[in-house]
Image (cartoon, coloured by chain):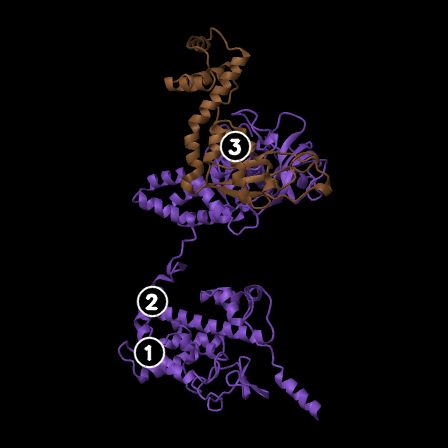
Chain colours: A brown, B purple
Amino acid sequence: MPERNKQFGLYGAQGIKGHQAVARQLDALAGYIATPVTARRGLLARLHYLTRSDHARARAHAAGLTVTDRTLRAWLAGKRSPSKANLERVERAYRTVRRENVARYLLARLNRQGHGTRVEIHPLNQSQVDRPRQRVVEFRTLNIRHWDRIVQAWVADDERGMDDAWVDQIVDLGSQWGQYEYVTNVGFAA
Amino acid sequence: MTDFEAIDALLAGARQEVPLPPVEERRALREGLNLSRTQVAQALSVSPSTVGGWESGRDPSGEVRAKYAYFLDGARTRLAAITGEEAAATETDAADATDGPEEADTVQPPGQDQDGQDDMEALALPQPCVLCGQPAAHQVAGFPQHLDPAACGTADSGRMTEPAETAETVAPQRPRHRPAQPGQEGAAGREDAARREGTAGRKSAVGRDGAAGRKGSVDRDGAAGRKGSVDRDGAAGRKSAAGGGLKVVPVGRRVREADTPDPVARAVADALAEHSGDVEAATAALVKRAIPDAMALLDASRKGGRYDVVAHPWLPEILRKQTARGADQIWEARPKWTRPELPAGRHEVTALDINGAYLSALKTHLPLGQLEHSTGDHHDRRRAGVHLITPPAWDHGAVLPNPIGNRDEPGPLWVTEPTLRLLLRLSGPKYGLCDPPVIHESWTSGATESLLEKFRTALKDARDRAIAEDDEVTLEYVKAMYSKFVSTMGESNYNRELYRTDWMHLIRSQAFTNLWWKAHRAYDQGLLVVRVMGTDELHVTGDWRAVFPEGRGVAEVKLKDTYAVGGEPDHPDGG
């Protein structure tokens, strides 16, 4: 790392890792069901999504929703309701399947047939840092043409892979890229 | 004795400053010839920014001033020649002014248009001629030179033409001596051409090259260069005269027609062509693509701008929707006010409509960067954003709407910059209508009012043109562009390229504030304000035409409706 980010926040800087901000934005673009899974409406919507077809069931099973069909039917009919652990499993399976389903289209829109997407990188927040320790970190934009690895890692929920893929892209910012390891926000449209 | 000689030499050397055309004309002259600053700067051995400085108010001095004056002079002569040519729309012939630098080498027969030279004056002390360097006793337009070419060292270069007057008077006359036919390229035609060149473009030769090569170049120009240029100029000159000039840009090794600078007109023309003139279908298609077109126009209008449009900033929680379909915490101060009571009697109420309210509201102080938090009762005029304020009490609800709209809930609320500025202004010494608001916290950033100014102007111009030409398609298209731009610039799935919830709130509030000021103006001018509603609706009684101009422009108001209140005309027992 070219910048001193080992003890990030030691002097009061605030921000999140760049790849987390990217994942957040990709999640926002994927458009999940807004109602939380704890509400009946949200649970039903997720279960319907996961049991819409045999293929969807298989994907849900692969994504960790390993309950029997009988249980699923009981949940859908409202005869039983899932335990807290199973609710979490439903939510995780839903997000995974949704990401997998969306990824193809999202990737095509982000790559835009090689044109790429303009990404805004908003630098970390230094408002709580002592004045002498504050550094000039500018707002930067970058056109990213190859989103494949980023989207792949996002679908697989692979933090490490996502970080690597993202850093591979932002090194194009130049020698100061390390200043953008932590950001307040990464914005792009798809 | 030697001292006096030195002084004499000094006096002889001290030339008076050459007059230059006014600043605004200099650039027009250069651009009229499609010359870049760099080209001119190279020719004058200065930097392009220096030329830019000369075109925006500075004046060169010394030798370079003479050179620059000489360039401008030549440019003016040539431009006048070109325009005169187009006006006359006659055949151009050989050795034309558009021929390039060679024509400058042609000869001016001596003393043929000495009348009409009012810039000519005799010099008290001989100065070096700008053509041959020998002492000359006269100067024309500030250039010392020999009036008699025989006396000039080169013997074949004439006087300078004066800058403006000659050009204007001579150029339109040019068709008169233009008998030369393409086939007839004899000595007569050449001489005629040479004579004309003497008035039109000769000056570019002065000082550039001496006497030596000139004779030869005359022959070359006359005999060789002329033949080729006849047909070319004949065709090109006519074409430019007919079409009012075709703008071209260099592309690779060719030139191409320059892009139409008006994307709105082009989009409308394309849509109409695509739907073969079906107005309704074209309008529907245009409205459908209004959002991406508006974004493209925004991008185009920010080219070369000082600030970038930041499309996806980090936004504080207050600007985020609390639920998927809910609202955020910003109060936009939308007016919804009806006068509680009217004076007794019958009233003719006029409902007025403010034209293009959101279009005008694009001019507002918009925060540029990321919003930063601050606390305390302090307002920085150079920043804009949203503020948590406790609004002041409003005691004029009987005649004027509350500037923060009709809010039922008491206590502090988040308002936007335009509302806060309205409140601050109203609480100031000039109006004194309320107490100043108390600011508790703010999320602000450095602001500019001109961020969307080019965008707004482009749309406004297109709208004005559409109204003037009664072009409903463009009107609808422009309306869809600005209204959808404003309504989708927040967290909308219809426009994912811009996530500026803060701007959306600010622009809307600005529209409401503009409406409030309209209401205040009506009140101030003695009208009775009856209702103020939404973005653009204002109901008044009285002679509103004396206050607001009627029309469809953004500075005018549109009559929507008139109705009567009270007084019961059928049963006149009430009054």
Type of amino acid under label 2? Ala
User: Helix, strand or loop at disc 1?
Assistant: helix
Q: Quote the CA–CA distance across marks 1 and 3.
A: 71 Å
Q: Mark 2 points at which residue?
A: B236
x and y, in percent, of residue A93 in the image: 48, 19
Count neighbours of disc 1 (C-alpha within 10 A) and say few if under 14, some if 14 to 19, many if 20 or more. few
Type of amino acid under label 1? Ala
- Asked if disc 1 and disc 3 are in contact, CB closer than 8 Å, the reply is no
Name the chain under label 3. Answer: A
User: Given this view, does label 1 or label 2 mark the residue nearer the observer?
Assistant: 1
Count neighbours of disc 3 (C-alpha within 10 A) and say few if under 14, some if 14 to 19, many if 20 or more. many
Count neighbours of disc 2 (C-alpha within 10 A) and say few if under 14, some if 14 to 19, many if 20 or more. few
The C terminus of chain B, quarter of image? top right
Q: Quote the CA–CA distance across marks 3 and 2.
A: 61 Å
Specify which label sits upstream in the sequence, 1 or 2.
1
x and y, in percent, of residue B469 in the image: 39, 50
Q: Name the residue under label 3.
A: A162
User: Given this view, does label 3 or label 2 mark the residue nearer the observer?
Assistant: 3
x and y, in percent, of residue A107 in the image: 43, 34
Type of amino acid under label 3? Met
Image height check: is B374 above or below B204? above
Based on the displayed image, in which of its 4 quarters is residue B100 positioned? bottom left
Evaluate whether label 1 is on the same chain as label 3: no
Q: Mark 1 points at which residue?
A: B224
The residue nearer to you, when weighing B145 against B2, is B2
Q: What residue is shown at x 39% (from left), y 37% (from top)?
A: B288
Name the chain under label 1. Answer: B
Q: Quote the CA–CA distance across marks 1 and 2.
A: 20 Å
x and y, in percent, of residue B376 in the image: 72, 35
Q: Which residue lies furthest to the left in this view?
A: B183
Name the chain under label 2. Answer: B
